[in-house]
Amino acid sequence: MTIALYPGSFDPVTYGHLDTAIRAARLFDTVVMAVFDRPKKNLLFSTAERVEMLREATRNLPHIRVETYNMLTVHYARQIGAKVIVRGLRVASDFEHEFQMAQINQTLEPDVDVVVFMASHKYTFLSSSTVREMAGLGGDVSELVPPHIVEALKRKFGSSV
């Protein structure tokens, strides 16, 4: 059984994240979408909120489970028996960062490979930070995130989302 780890902050989860997870689940027996507990980011949602929202978003998706972690990603991959780390690339500028991280991870844990999914064309512009910014300014994000995420954003920013 091949376990793939799909790590991220998922603040919030978007349809782009879910697209990558669904595509990864077609190739691997289990995809663990792991919410990183301590990213160096200004988060909108707490870890518990992000986990809850991600579980709701994936509840009907077979072979995908949601967990949280707070250590080096490759160490967590080893802990859960993952042989693969899944990453998504939206634009060319993502490549440099992901390539560097893959090289570091390979140095730390040579038995864990990185598999990159190119974003589906309809999600190349989509990021959690874009969703947060749009929602914070009263924009409609209903085409970008699941309905329960829209509601969570409304609670954070007010009903104008």
Image (cartoon, helix red, strand yellow):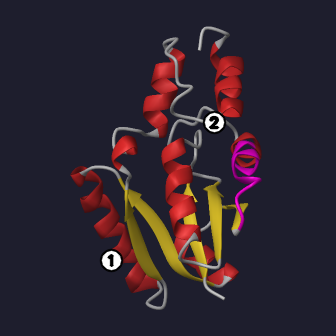
7 left or right of 48?
A: left
Instruction: Give the quarter of the image for residue 72.
Output: bottom right
Nearer the observer, 38 or 35: 35
The residue at 52%/11% (across/down) is 138
**Residue 152 percent across, percent down from the top left:** 70, 27
Dot 2 and dot 1 residues touching (CB under 8 Å): no
- Residue 125 vertical position relative to residue 68 in the rendered view, above or below: above
Nearer the observer, 113 or 40: 113
Residue under label 2: 146
- Residue 84 vertical position relative to residue 71 in the rendered view, above or below: below
Instruction: Give the quarter of the image for residue 129.
Output: top left
**Residue 85 percent across, percent down from the top left:** 50, 73
- Residue 44 vertical position relative to residue 102 in the rendered view, above or below: above
Mark 2: amino acid = Pro
Residue under label 1: 103
The residue at 24%/60% (across/down) is 96
Residue 40 in view here: no
Q: Secondary structure at mark 1?
A: helix
Nearer the observer, 28 or 12: 28
151 left or right of 101?
A: right
Q: Secondary structure at mark 2?
A: loop
Mark with earlier residue (2, 1): 1
Task: Find the magenta span and give its range.
Answer: 53-62
The residue at 63%/16% (across/down) is 157
